[in-house]
Image: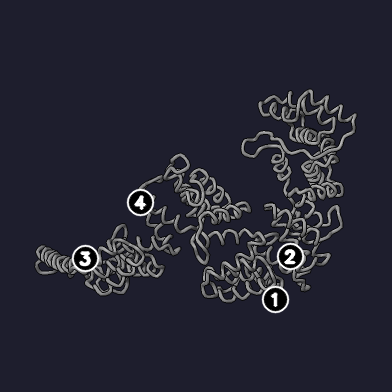
Amino acid sequence: MKTISKFIISTALTAACLGIGNAQFVSAQEPTIMMTDAERAEANKATEIGTFDDGLRAMNSGNKKRATEIWLPLAQNGHARAQFTLGYMYGQGIYFDINDHKAIEWWEKASNNGYTDAQQALGMLLYLGNNTIPKDPTRAAKWNKLAADGGSAYGQLYIGVQYGMGNGVPKDLVQAEKYLQMAVAQGNTEAIKMLAAVKDELKTGEGSAAYTDGMTAYLKGDYKKARKILEKEAKAGDAKSQFAVGEMYRLGQGVRASQKTAFKWLQKAATQNHPKAQVNLGRAYLLGLGVKTSNETAFKWYKKAADQDEPAGWASVGYAYANGRGVTLDYEKAVFWYNKALDEGLAVAQFSMGDLVENGFGIQQSDKVAVKLYEMAVAQDNIDAMINLAILTDEGRGTAQNSRRAVELYRQAADKGSAPGAVYLGTMYLSGRGVAKNAQTGARYVEQGAEGGDPWGMHMMSLLYQSGNGVSKSNSRSLDWLKKASFAGFAAAQTDLAVKYEFGDGVTGNLNERDKWIKHATDNGYAEAEYWRANFHGQNGKFKKAKVWYEKARAQGYAPASQALADMASGTMQSDYKIKKKRGMEAMRASRAAERGSDPWGFNAIANSRRKSCRANPGKNANGYRDVNGTWRCP
């Protein structure tokens, strides 16, 4: 099980005490607490000083002293909300110096009065511990369970984790699954990951004692020790250990990364019906990681995992159908499988279904629904969802238009290493959308994405160097990036490169290179490339072939192709071709006549031909010789 990060406690407590939007203290409904007559009299006396809401108003106006003077007597007289709030103030150093022992003292009072937020806070603090409070999982379990049964999502998360790990309570995966499912139902994204781990253990078993030792070392970050223990178990045939070792080789944890070795161990585990190993083995076949690419074999392993009710297997089968990888493209089947994974809260399924909904593939199109799905995936740090949500937010589709938020989403993706995210962020700086316009910063982000392997970023860098926008103008660097983008398969770059070879723009004219790159671009179905391929045929008088490619481009809505077809139908294109051809022949005759005029007998032409042949064949041509230093000379 994964260790919960300590930031959760601060986040949860802040949410309990503070309004998220305006960072102000807010009131909450009080639990019903029975008091004796004497206690009621003391409470009435405290109320004369002020009500809890009076304290809220004082705190929100900046008068912490007045708020404390109101809340302290209320808390001393059993006011649960006031007790909890004083504990929070001690825990966060608000008005008082930070004192976790005082925080616990007030939270225990509120907890004993049935205050769920206090039970949640107390349980988390005792479970996590800190520099002054030692971990006490047994006491933590008591309060986490009370908070969970009282409806606290964090209480459900923590008691679920404790049951899953057998930490502070006897290990009980059924109870762990129950409470984690409750937390997931309330939208707790941390619980989604924990629930998946619990379900995996329910399916595949707890594992051997050595496996447990290895995974304990792994969770502590001691990868070398973990690999040593787990690899021994893996060699003995333990499927869970084989999967774990395969992942460590894939990620380079405690050992040098090796996709081939990772594949070997994943294959061993997969053949023993380990569902997650089957998913990752399918991924290896899909991407060619340590094995020759095979979409069909990838799908086979994805389906085996899906048939074992592995959520990642469901999502992977959905991906195969959505993209026609190893099976015939079928969006409706993709929707079916993604829906199954959605029920388990998988971020990749949330993103992928959002993508289908946004485009109306196999399901009714809805930008609003797509935004909701992307938001769910973003909450789980899905980078692809960050980018798609940013695009919709920038365009105001399915949500209020907000370029600033789009910038932050792109930045979030870029900071997590997303090359496309960096390129999109660069475009925002270049255009000044949602952020102050800054061409240099924009170019820097675009280059970050290009260096990260994004073909669009490579093409953009070519254009930036060509125009000198945000970078020093450089035709050579522009051409370098254009070639990189072309070799990376970016059709727009391939088209631009083909046109350059046609006209000798920055390169030596080369019809073979032109034809090679325009074919690559048209094979990708790029409309502008189809238009230019038609142009190349038309320039050579091959009007039937030109018509075929113009029609392909027009079918994709490329307007210039429609005009070209109209010119062809009217005969204008054919007439222009004849004029250009005639002028071209006349220019060629004039050029040859000029050459002959300066060399009436052709002697210079012959000498140039011999010299060229000599240079092309050093040491072999009869017209050359070697000087005293052995250097080949051509007179």
- Identify residue type, mark 1: Thr
Residue 186, above or below 332: above
| Residue shown at the point (72%, 26%) measured from the top left | 64
Placement of 260 over or under 99, stated as above or below? below
Where residue 466 is drawn, which disc sits there? 4
Quarter of the view holding residue 548: bottom left
Upstream in sequence: badge 3 or badge 1: 1
**Residue 567, labelled with which disc?**
3
Could you give the CA–CA distance between mark 4 and mark 2, rounded to whole angstroms?
53 Å
How far apart are labels 4 and 3 at the CA level? 32 Å
Q: Which mark is residue 271?
A: 1
Q: In the image as oriented, which residue stretches furthest toward the front?
A: 37
Residue 186 at x, y = what percent? 69, 52
- The quadrant of the picture occupied by the C terminus is bottom left
Under circle 4, the secondary element is helix
> 565 left or right of 173?
left
Element under disc 1: helix
On the image, the x and y values in percent for residue 190 come to: 70, 53
Question: Type of residue at label 4?
Answer: Gln
Closer to the N terminus: mark 3 or mark 2? 2
Residue 49: quarter of image: top right
Q: Residues within 10 Å of mark 4 (few under 14, many from 20)?
A: some
